Image (cartoon, rainbow, N blue to C red):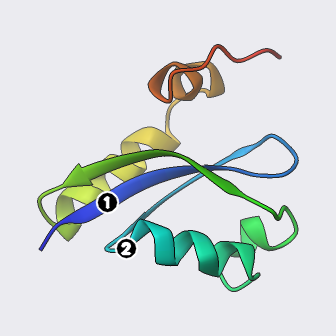
Amino acid sequence: MSCYCYILECADGTYYTGWTVDPERRLAMHNKGRGARYTRTRVPVKLVYVEELPDRKSAMKREIAIKKMKRERKGKLIGREVDR
């Protein structure tokens, strides 16, 4: 079963990275305040990056790798130059 690693841009301009089997459903959960604790106070959030992976283990590894990236690298990954 395919899984997805995703990046959300929060209302305060920060990024949140996670994984899911259904990116659109997960985005709706985050925006309803039922997603991760981090995003609950930073709604609305928008989906800015999705990467399909073959399985859950791969998606979880990719999530960890993205979370270790600096903001500038995440900006390049999603196709944006990031100002600080």
Q: Position of residue 53 (x, y in %)?
A: 19, 54
Mark 2 or 1: in front is: 2
Relative horizontal placement of residue 81, taking residue 12 as reference (left or right): left
Mark 2 vs mark 1, CA separation in Å: 7 Å
Residue that badge 1 annotates: 4
Q: Nearer the viewer, residue 78 or 68?
A: 78
Element marked by disc 2 = loop
Label 2: few (<14), some or many (≥20) within 10 Å? few
Q: Quadrant of residue 28?
A: bottom right
Relative horizontal placement of residue 64, taking residue 75 as reference (left or right): left
Task: Tell me the quarter of the image containing the C terminus.
Answer: top right
Residue that badge 2 annotates: 22
Q: Quadrant of residue 1?
A: bottom left
Relative horizontal placement of residue 73, taking residue 55 as reference (left or right): right
> Measuring 66% from the left and 54% from the top, which residue is drawn there?
46
Q: How many marks?
A: 2
> Is residue 62 shown above or below 72?
below
Label 1: few (<14), some or many (≥20) within 10 Å? many
The amino acid beneath tag 2 is Asp
Relative horizontal placement of residue 71, taking residue 25 as reference (left or right): right
Check if mark 2's residue and mark 1's residue have beta carbons within 8 Å.
yes
The numbered mark, 2 or 1, whose residue comes first in the sequence reads: 1
> Measuring 17% from the left and 66% from the top, which residue is drawn there?
2
Element marked by disc 1 = strand
> Measuring 70% from the left and 18% from the top, which residue is drawn there?
82
Q: Position of residue 43 (x, y in %)?
A: 82, 65
> Is residue 67 shown above or below 59?
above
Q: Position of residue 8 (x, y in %)?
A: 61, 51
Q: Quadrant of residue 22?
A: bottom left
Which label sits on residue 56?
none
The amino acid beneath tag 1 is Tyr
> Is residue 35 shown above or below 74?
below
